Amino acid sequence: MLPEIGRGGQERLAAARVLLIGAGGLGSPAALYLAAAGVGTLGLIDFDRVDLTNLQRQVLHGTSAIGRPKVASAAERIADLNPGVRVVPIEQRLSAANARAILGDYDIVVDGTDNFPTRYLVNDICVWLGKPLVYGSILRFEGQASVFYAPEGPCYRCLYAEPPPPELVPNCAEGGVLGVLPGIVGSLQALEAIKWVTGVGESLVGRLLLFDALRVRFRELRVSKDPECPVCGEHPTITEPIDYAAFCGVTADRAGADAVTSRALAQELAGNRATDMPLVLLDVREPWEWEIAHIAGAMPLPLGQLPDRLREIDPRADLVTICHHGARAEKARQLLEAAGFTQVRTLSGGIDEWAQQVDASLKRY
């Protein structure tokens, strides 16, 4: 009924092959609206399983799907919504080894990832294959959306040339997100994909849309193509898929060595404490998290207060930093080592892994 789309636009949707990377917070609304619009083939790639803590934002799944692969749950929901859509579930982790082959089968890619390694990898492959990439990201109360298409505009690396160290960046599970926010941003991504396929309207190529949920305010920034971009610039220096650790300047050997020397496993730490080994556990989570659950004997010291409270910590002590899953604990470890502390480890998997492997009485969140 929309004259801008009409029969021809609907036929283009029916013939389109759209790849959705991630069936989580962003992927949930994007998948639902793409399927409802009549996209002919919808590829879904995700290697994770549905968890109870996902459901406040990942509305594609329900409580009956807890423990199931997300792609299986998503495929079932989409089939119920629109059985005319051919869903291609891909239950695997996207990597430098398989990304080119997977993305090569689709016309347009919608990025619903929540981590930088995949985001940079997907961007690079889309540049080399000449495919449009519908970008979205969310955290707490803020979201972003754009379309990256190197033949006509910038790519993701033109905006953010290099990724930060992975251990220093929280995802939604670590940093939190208002559940409605991915619904808004994911819907915008579906909108951009539908517009691209049907050829209507003005795409977000060259524009970065910023959304502030607390003030319900949209802002738009112009993004120009960077002639020195290492992937889409005039003299590209990155021409093949690379692994994230190598891109950050950390070799596999060094990464492995760091993992061994700077992380304490939950069961190992529990055994050390049982033998009265002198340890100081620094819990760097927020006070509200401490109230939900904490390890007996740990010292509450929120990460934001750590630089001003270093004098409270014995520099000779064997320290173990703790957070929810590990990202903030790693930040704390690096901060402490920079301040001169020499015996610092992080609790691998955080208090969540401790609750699963050591103390089942602790509440998980």
Image (tube, helix red, strand yellow):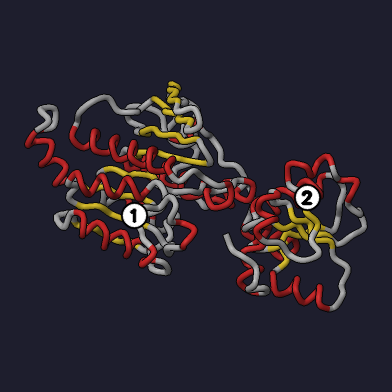
Q: Report the side of 55 relative to 331 (left or right).
A: left
Say the numbered circle drawn on residue 301: 2
Marks 2 and 1: in contact by CB < 8 Å?
A: no
The image shows residue 74 at horizontal and vertical percentages of 31, 59
Q: Is residue 247 left or right of residue 86?
A: right
Give the amino acid type for the residue marked by disc 1 in the picture.
Leu
Q: Which residue is mark 1?
A: 60
Q: 181 above or below 117?
A: above
Q: Earlier in the sequence, mark 1 or mark 2?
A: 1
- Evaluate whether residue 289 shows in this view: yes
Identify which residue, 318 or 257, lies in the foreground. 318
Tell me residue 358's x, y (percent).
Answer: 67, 74
Name the quarter where the C terminus is drawn. bottom right
Q: Residue at x 30, y 61 (%)?
A: 89
The x and y percentages for residue 170 are 59, 47
Q: Residue at x 14, y 46 (%)?
A: 14
Looking at this view, name the residue that lies furthest to the left: 7
Going by the numbered disc 2, the residue's amino acid type is Leu
